[in-house]
Image: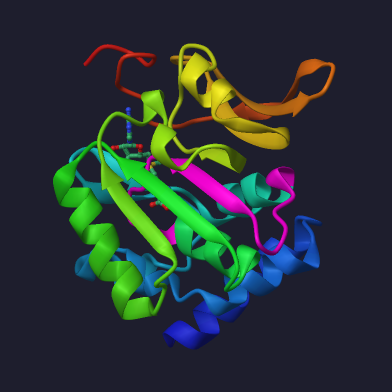
Amino acid sequence: MELEKLHRRMIEGIRRLGVKPEVVEAMEKVPRHLFVPEDRVHEAYDDHPLPIGDGQTISAPHMVAMMCDLLDIEPGNKILEVGGGSGYHAAVMAELVGKDGEIYTIERFERLAEFARENLKRAGYENVKIFVGDGSLGLPEFAPYDRINVTCAAPSIPPPLLDQLRVGGRMVIPIGRYMQELYLVEKREDGIHREIKGDVVFVPLIGKYGFRE
Ligand code: SAM
């Protein structure tokens, strides 16, 4: 089947999840086949994670949709992503924030950061800035963020990420080593609110406030 048809079929699956229409529209616009290794293009629109090298993965489309939905992204938001990987999730968020928004993504592997840079460039996303480093420390120079999207599993919520989240902001983060749960964290005037949204499987966050290598 040609890629366009496979993309449409993937979008029908995303629509059935019941996520916000804006999330479906954003995923309709981003060509996922430009974010996977060449030998995986035929699987680009299947609903499962795919290897992208360095032992890492591009998350399954339904997981990208659910995380964007929980983040409740608004046009103009400034977002930090921890775990840039292929750049796909960042591209979907770039669609959601629009031309007035900003996306900062941090990736620990130089090669993957370069892969994300190339993918985002050829897909035409110029408002995504990619950094190499330990994302468990956040990216303090551009804080505070309206939203924080963590795409790797942490032992607990890294304190620097909480510090860099704006009051009124939201973060999604998988917590746990083998048994992981996806948390929605809200920073409100009266404190931090956490809610578990379901069981998930992510690669580990490796870093100062993550797991050891
Ligand atoms: N968002 C990505 C995408 O759209 O392709 C998927 C990311 S993958 C599930 C998780 C990523 O987190 C991996 O690329 C991994 O190298 C990265 N990672 C793990 N620990 C990290 C850390 N401390 N700082 C930054 N990135 C980290």
Q: Name above or below for residue 177 compared with residue 11.
A: above
Counting from the top left corner in percent of width and height, residue 68 is at 65, 51
Quadrant showing the N terminus: bottom left
161 sits left or right of 194 in the view = left
Counting from the top left corner in percent of width and height, residue 3 is at 43, 83
Residue at the front extreme, as displayed: 141
14 sits left or right of 138 in the view = right
Counting from the top left corner in percent of width and height, residue 34 is at 34, 73
Q: Name above or below for residue 161 compared with residue 124.
A: above
Quadrant showing the C terminus: top left
Residue at the left extreme, as displayed: 111
Say if the magenta span includes residue 83. Answer: yes
* Residue at x 57% of width, y 37% of height: 144
Q: Is residue 158 visible?
A: no
16 sits left or right of 129 in the view = right
Give the quarter of the image for residue 183. Answer: top right
Quadrant of the image where one finds ligand 1: top left
Give the quarter of the image for residue 195. Answer: top right
Q: Which of 105 and 166 is in front in this view?
A: 166
Q: Nearer the viewer, residue 31 or 139?
A: 139
Give the quarter of the image for residue 76. Answer: bottom right
Give the residues in magenta. 70-89
Q: Is residue 3 visible?
A: yes
37 sits left or right of 77 in the view = left
Q: Name above or below for residue 22 compared with residue 77.
A: below
Q: Name above or below for residue 182 compared with residue 23.
A: above
- Numbered disc total: 0
